[in-house]
Amino acid sequence: LWGRAPVGKQVEHHDLFVQWCRYSMIAALAVDEGIIVLRVLEGSSKHNTFLEYLCDYMLPLTTPFPGPQCPS
């Protein structure tokens, strides 16, 4: 703890402990349209979470090459 106190006194600081939530964001960016899919998760993103994102959110938007980038 850093702070100032009179000579011979100890610095005291009392505050509530607040534990913050961690969020992860996964986004897909298309060159001509910007962000096309965005997912925000509470907590850290894991391998299976990313695979779920690809299968459930990204793959439905894809088309075979050389088709258009994002079906409307």
Image (cartoon, helix red, strand yellow):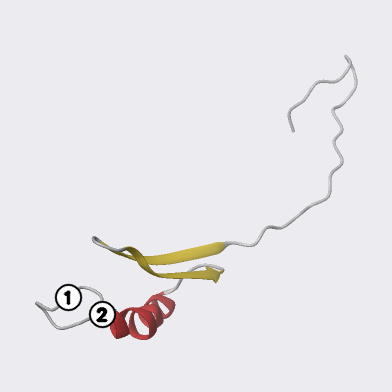
Front residue of this view, candidates 42 and 60: 60
Query: As drawn, is 16 to the left or to the right of 61?
Result: right
Q: Tell me if 69 is positioned left or right of 1 in this view.
A: left
Residue 46 drawn at (x, y percent) = 44, 73
Q: Which label was assigned to residue 46?
A: none
**Quadrant of the rendering where the C terminus is positioned:** bottom left
Q: Position of residue 42 (x, y in %)?
A: 58, 69
Q: Is residue 66 left or right of residue 45?
A: left
Describe the element under mark 1 as helix, strand or loop: loop
Residue at left offset 84%, top offset 44%: 15
Q: Residue at x 76, y 54 (%)?
A: 18
Q: Is residue 35 above or below residue 10?
A: below
Q: Residue at x 44, y 78 (%)?
A: 49
Circles 1 and 2: CB distance less than 8 Å?
yes
Tell me where residue 60 appears, x and y as whole percent.
31, 85
- Judged from this view, the residue extending furthest toward the front is 72
Quarter residue 48 falls in = bottom left
Q: CA distance from mark 1 to mark 2?
A: 7 Å
Checking the image for residue 71, the label placed there is: 2
In the rendered image, the vertical position of residue 15 relative to residue 66, given as above or below: above
Instruction: State which quadrant residue 14 falls in.
Output: top right
Q: Which residue is mark 1?
A: 68
The kind of residue on which mark 1 rests is Pro
Residue count near mark 1 (Cα–Cα under 10 Å), binned few <14, some 14–19, many ≥20: few
Residue type marked 2: Pro
The quarter holding residue 57 reads bottom left
**What residue lies at 86% left-to-right and 20% top-to-bottom?**
5
Helix, strand or loop at label 2? It is loop
Percent across and percent down for residue 71 are 26, 79
Label 2 packing within 10 angstroms: few (<14), some (14-19), many (20+): few
